[in-house]
Each structure stands twice: as structure tokens, then as C-alpha cells.
Amino acid sequence: MCGISLVAGFEHLIISIELPDPDDRHVVAAAIHGGASLIVTYNLKDFPAAQLTRYHLVAQHPDDFIADLLDLHAARVCEAAASQRRSLKNPPKSVDEYLDTLSKQKLTQTVAQLREWKAAL
């Protein structure tokens, strides 16, 4: 479904980024350098829309991001969630335990949608 990417060579951009928390500038610099249009983060307060607009970026909460993906590609998201759940070995988690873990991670919309696909998880 997706892989992990490593962005390098963005460091020269950090100094020019303006954010409420200067320690988050590297995230925007890497997004710009990598050609991203979206930053997925729980930390929305430190990525205000007014400041991200100048970089042609938007910040989105992980729950909204996954819920949007579920609307677009439910089967693929369920496949990824099932794969992640099966990879949990210490301890393994039942579907309900897995969904409870996601709830604790503030993924309430995601969990509500995934409950409809419980048999696939």
C-alpha cells in the first residue's frame, strides 16, 4: 500500500521557515523539499493554516487523514490495518483490543469506520 520515505537535503530550507515552534521547522522544510502537500500531525496548533498556506501545505489530524482514506479506499486501508494488527506479537491483539488501542490514540472516527469492517481486520 505505502512505504516509508526518508527525505534528505532539506536542511538549507529550515532557516527560512516561520512557525510558532521553531523546533518544528524541519517538518515543513522536509515537506517542501519532498514535494508534499499535506503534513499529518497530532500537533495542529504548531502548524497553523495561515502560515502553512505560504508553503502550499495543509496540516491534518491523523484521524481525519485515515477517515478520508477509508472513504476513498476502504478495502486497502482495512488490509493495512489487518496487517498491522497481525504484526503485533508482544502481546498479540484481538480486533477489539486493536481498535481500543486506536481509540486511545485519538483515532475515534477511524475506529468508528473500522468497526463496520471488523470482519476484515
Image (cartoon, helix red, strand yellow):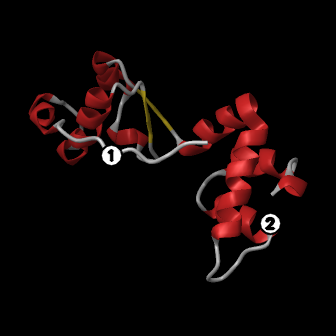
- Horizontal placement of 37 versus 105: left or right? left
Residue 44: which quarter of the image? top left
Residue 77: which quarter of the image? top right
Q: Secondary structure at mark 1?
A: loop
Q: Residue furthest bottom?
A: 90
Residue at 22% from the left image edge and 39% from the top image edge: 25
Quadrant in which the N terminus appears:
top right
Q: Which residue is mark 2?
A: 95
Q: What percent of the width, then of the height, locates residue 116?
A: 88, 47
Q: Earlier in the sequence, mark 2 or mark 1?
A: 1
Q: Secondary structure at mark 2?
A: helix
Residue at 72% from the left image edge and 28% from the top image edge: 72
Residue at 60% from the left image edge and 54% from the top image edge: 106
- Horizontal placement of 51 versus 106: left or right? left
Q: CA distance from mark 2 to mark 1?
A: 31 Å
Residue type at tag 1: Leu
Q: What percent of the width, then of the height, locates residue 48?
A: 36, 30
Instruction: Give the label on residue 87, or none.
Output: none
Q: Which residue is mark 1?
A: 6
- Horizontal placement of 61 versus 84: left or right? left
